[in-house]
Amino acid sequence: MKIAQNRLDRGFVRYQEEFEAKALEVLRSGWYILGGEAEAFEREFAAYTGAGYCVGLASGLDALWLAFRVLGIGAGDEVIVQANTYIASVMGITINGAVPVFVEPDEYFNMDPGKIEEKITERTRAILVVHLYGQASDMASVVRLCKKYNLRLVEDCAQSHGACYDGKMTGTFGDIGCFSFYPSKNLGGFGDGGAIVTDDAQIAADMKMYRNYGSEKRYYNKVVGANSRLDELQAGLLRVRLSHIKELTQERRELAERYAGSLRNPSLMLPKVREHADSVWHQYVVSCERRQELIDYLNEKEIGTIIHYPIPPHLSEAYRSLGYRRGSFPVTEHYADTVLSLPMYNGMTREEQEYVIEALNRFQ
């Protein structure tokens, strides 16, 4: 049996008639940018998250860098972010000329709240929380620090669509929540797409201006903006998927529960879920000190895996100028050397998962 780490086709086939009907509806409408589908998706996604406003954008990275741009964070400002995140989180900061200040993660792979305060300086303007792998971060601690030091709070929710902390959805704790709708996300489209959510009407208005060349009125440009709009086709298809998000999330939770209840190999450290938080299991990430041996073994069994992520941003060539070296963030680097994402996708059959579990339990 051959099993990929992810299968996007399964998510399409399940609702194929709905997706195809919506695609034809949009194509026949004759309106493809900033129309009724985008407006409807923005309303529906805001309602789903519990936010006051949603603004559709072209990608998750655009959501991040435009968030800091709208908040006025730029050259010389510092933004605290966890060190083990995907590099796009850091790019959202540095595109604006601001400086990323890295914090180690905790045992849940998210920002360690006990390590934040020591990194706050007079130049700190914001904290960027990343809800990695689908689990909500410790937002009570982060919100408390933001209030204490008068800091902006941005959430990277690219992997946490629907995850909650104390019953409140990720993306709604701070000034701006940033989402990606890349096809592999839990709420994924069929191309690039993103959005921000906020409770601040002015932030929403500014974001709509920035996404459309800095223009509120056609050909009248107030600022140097961007071309970053969620197109009508993606918005329409995302509306279809959003209408099924609860059942899709429940399916992933059942897959995660089966892994947790059936994996018995002492070589594997299974993921933990934080108290007061839940996970939507964008990835099911284990840790293994003999990771390459495990990957080679699973490859022989034709079981696909992915490392999220093998090179932390502070060790990447892109950020060599920051001056970090191996050893700068040992917890992050240990995760980079040991984490492995197991097969996890909507439409994964029980037979497929049991094959993966049996293989993992037999690994020696």
Image (tube, grey):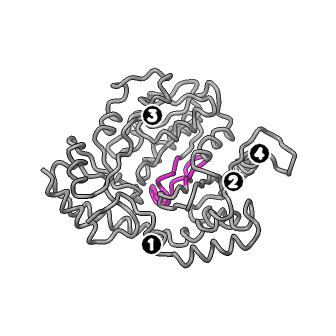
* Residue holding disc 3: 313
Q: CA distance from mark 1 to mark 2?
A: 28 Å
> What is the secondary structure assignment of the residue under circle 3?
helix
* First along the sequence among labels 1 and 2: 2
Indicate which disc residue 308 carries.
none
Alpha carbon distance from label 3 to label 1:
34 Å
Q: Residue at x 66, y 62 (%)?
A: 42
| Rendered image: mark on residue 229 | 2
Q: Element under label 4?
A: loop
Between circles 4 and 1, the one closer to the viewer is: 4
Closer to the eye: label 3 or 1: 3
**Is residue 134 within the magenta segment?**
no
From the image, tell me which residue sits under label 4. 213
Image disc number at residue 247: 1
CB-based contact (under 8 Å), mark 4 and mark 1:
no
Nearest to N terminus: mark 2 or mark 3: 2
The residue stretch that appears in magenta: 156-180
Is residue 165 located in the magenta-colored stretch of the structure? yes
Earlier residue among tags 4 and 1: 4
Q: Is residue 314 left or right of residue 128?
A: left
Q: Amino acid under label 3?
A: Pro
